[in-house]
Structure formats: structure tokens, C-alpha cells
Amino acid sequence: MKKLHTLIIKSYLGPFILTFFITLFIFVMQFLWKYIDELVGKGLEWYLVAELLFYASANLVPMALPLAILLASIMTFGSFGEHYELVAMKSSGMGLLRIMYPLLLVTIFTSFCAFLFTNFVWPKANLEFASLLYDIRHKKPAFDITEGVYYDGLDGYVIRIENKDEDGKGLNDILIYDHTKKEGNIHVIRAEKGRMEMSKDERYLEFTLENGASYEEVLESTKPHMKSAFDKEVLRFDLSGFQMERSDKDIFKDNYQMLNLVQLENAVDTYRLAIVKRDIEYGKLIHRKTLPEDLDSAQASQLSSPDSIKTLAYNAIFKEHKVALIETAISQLRSNKTYVTSRANVRISNVKTINRHLIEWHRKFTLSFACVILFFIGAPLGAIIRKGGLGMPVVISVLFFLVYHITSITSEKMVKQGELAPYKGMWIASIILLPIGLFLTYKASTDSSLFDIETYTKSIRNFFLRLFSAKSNPTKDK
């Protein structure tokens, strides 16, 4: 490898790694703000939150990687142009494509790694993320009794504490409703003070009550009310329901986001075969339900011509039970209509499921292709604007990425709604950006002043000068 190639690659890798982690961090923070309400107040250990963010970051790599390539390529070639290094390379006889060649190889290698990531790593990360997020969502909030508020987080109990001591463990004016028998407020415990502590294994919450009484209604007794006083009593509450239980990951593994290419193809084939099988069964059922039950095979074969159908209908109408036959026919038509509507809804649902699988199938390729296209947009743009750093390159790269991302999201939504074919919806953003990349590459190769404001202002100024000169000398043309 030439020293110049090494210099170009080193100049690119630094901004690429920096921008990749910056954009990934921004997307992770966006995710955190989205789900912050479901994480706060549940007493989650720090490693569970870190694990969730790790899997979320893996899920966000397909968004951060194209933006990082676009931004890094603009910064690299913009810095080359700003410090006249690009001019020196061109003066030695190297064209822009020759200068871009080593970074193009790096981008192709990155695209290949992105394909491997989306095919093997991303499905597993999605599985772990979905499973962990499901468990966190269904975890009970952390045990927290507020002064003067009825707390019903413990199964079968409602507790109210008037106030707490400064250490948070001493309690005053305690009121406990026992609903474990599920018969209403038939058992109430009241104490002047007490203490709340966790057991050594943290599986139980122990209430040590002092100077209190227990009130209980006995429904099946001659004495409907029973009261017992106590100087000291200990109540233990099971806290196992507050521990987060990990669910079985197998319930998520068949989701289309958790499948690789081979699994997606097998799933699509399975759904398509199921549709064909149901269509055949549907045709047989409609044929069987349409024909009268008292027809033999010979009569049924005669129904192939319209004249035979008219003759059969004419004879049936003038039978003794023509009213019953008409009512039966109407009922049969309504039944067929309901069945057809239900079958159509099932078919639409299956087609949408197939489209979602095909979306994920195409996504594994569109990400890699988008990395190459955005490189062909970023590198020429950097050579044209000749500005490095995080100023102008950030603005331009964000604009192009927004065009790509909004187009991708819109077309993907149209595919899910059945308005576009999956291959069209998933590739339309790349098809739109490909001509832009080729155009910018051509302009940069020919040293076009595409973004030179002075060029446009000079042309406009010359136009107005010619216009005013023509008005001031109307006889000049004559």
C-alpha cells in the first residue's frame, strides 16, 4: 500500500470512528428519553439498564453507520480541500476517483461488515432487547410507601402510613387492610407505631407493629365482629412479585425482526404455501356450499352451462316448498358473504405479514448499499465545499441523511400498508440518492464550482449589467 493511501485512510478513520459513536450516542439518548417513564421508579439494577442500552445501541447501528460514513467522508475530503492537499494530489496527476479509491475499498469492506451485522448480530440483539424490555415493562414499581397515601402495591393488602421517622424505617399511625380472603374490608389492623425492615435475604418485608389492634368481621358466626389487641406483632409480606422475572425468549424468536436471511425466506415460503392451501380449501368449500344438497353428481355436472342452471332454478321454484328454498338460499348467501369477508381479512393479514418479512429481507441489503451511495455523496461534496471540521459538513450531511431517512421511513410505511411492493419501497431511497451521488462525483471530478456562491453572484451581476446597458443604449442594436 502506498504511503499516500495510508495517509488518506488514517485521515478518514479518525472522523469516522468519532462521528459513528457521537451519532450512536445521540440515538441512544433519544431512545432513553422515549422509554424513561418505563425505567424510572422500578428499582432496576444498573447492569440491567446498561444491558438494555447495549442492546438498544446494537439496534440503532443501521441508523448511525450511514450517517457516520457520510459525515466522515465530507470531513475528510473537505479538510483535504481546505488545506490544499487535494490540489497537490491532483497536480501530481491523480484524479478524484483515484484519490477516493482507498476509501472506497474501506467503505465496501464496511458495507460487507454491515451486511454480516444485520444478518447475524442484529437479529440476536433484537431478540435480547425485546425480551428484556418486555420484562422491564411488566415489572412492578419499586416498593415505596408515601406518607398519607394508600399503597396497594402488595398483593392482597392496602397500607396507609401517617408519617415516617427521619431514618425512613420508623412508622407512625399505621393502617393495614387485609384483602387476602377477597371478601372486602373484613380484616383491618391498626397500630400506633411500628418499624419497617427488609429480611436478610431481601425476599420479605417485615412490619413490627406496636400498641395496636386487629378488627375482623366473622360472616359465618353468631359473633359478627372480633377484636384483638396486641402490644407487639410482626407481619411479613412476600416481595417476590417485585423481582424481575426473565421470560422465555422463545416467545419472541419467530418475530420477523429476529430472523436472518435464510429464516426469513423459509417464513415467507411457509406463509405463501399457507395462503395457497387456504385458497384451495376456500374454493372447495364455496363450491360445496353453493350446490343444493340433494343434487347427485350427474346433476352437478350439468350445471356447467347457463341453460342448465336456468332450468334447474325454474323447476325448483315451482316445488311445494319454494318459500323455504328461497329462505334457505338467502341464508346460504349471507353465510357465504360472511365467510368470504372473513377469508379476505385473513388473506390481507397474511399478505401484510409476508410484506413485513420481505421488508427485513431487503433491509439487510439496503443498509450496505446505502453506505456506498452516501460515500459517493460525501466525498465529492467535501471536495467541492472544501471545508473540514464539524461546521458546514455536519449541516450538509444531516440534510442528505434526512432525505434518505424520511424517504426510507415513508416508503416502508407504504409497504406495510400494502400500497407498494416490498422491493420498491425498500430500494426507492437508494434509487433516488444514486443519481445524486453520480452527479456530485462527476462535478467534483471536473472541478466544478457547484457550491461557490461567488460564481452565481457573478453570473447574476453580469446579467443585470447587460440588461441595464441594453436599456441605456436602445439604438445600439439598430
Image: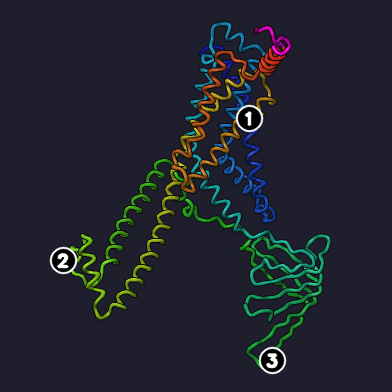
Residue named by callout 3: 223
| Residue type, numbered disc 1 | Thr
Which of the pair 61/413 is nearer the observer?
Answer: 413
Whether residue 113 appears in this view of the structure is no
Q: Position of residue 193 (x, y in %)?
A: 80, 71
Task: Characterize the local packing of mark 2: few (<14), some (14-19) or many (20 or more) Cα atoms within 10 angstroms.
Answer: few
Task: Tell me where the magenta segment starts and ends, as one range.
Answer: 469-478
Task: Characterize the local packing of mark 3: few (<14), some (14-19) or many (20 or more) Cα atoms within 10 angstroms.
Answer: few
**Residue 445 occupies quadrant:** top right
Residue named by callout 2: 298
**Outermost residue toward the bottom in this view:** 222
Whether residue 269 appears in this view of the structure is yes
**Residue 19 occupies quadrant:** top right
Viewer-side label of 3, 1: 1
Distance of mark 1 from mark 2, alpha carbons? 78 Å
Image quadrant containing the C terminus:
top right
Viewer-side label of 1, 2: 2
Residue named by callout 1: 19
**Outermost residue toward the left in this view:** 298
Whether the magenta-drawn stretch holds residue 135 is answered as no
| Residue type, numbered disc 3 | Lys
Which of the pair 431/81 is nearer the observer?
Answer: 431
Give the mark nearer the N terminus: 1 vs 2.
Answer: 1
Q: Position of residue 460 (x, y in %)?
A: 68, 17
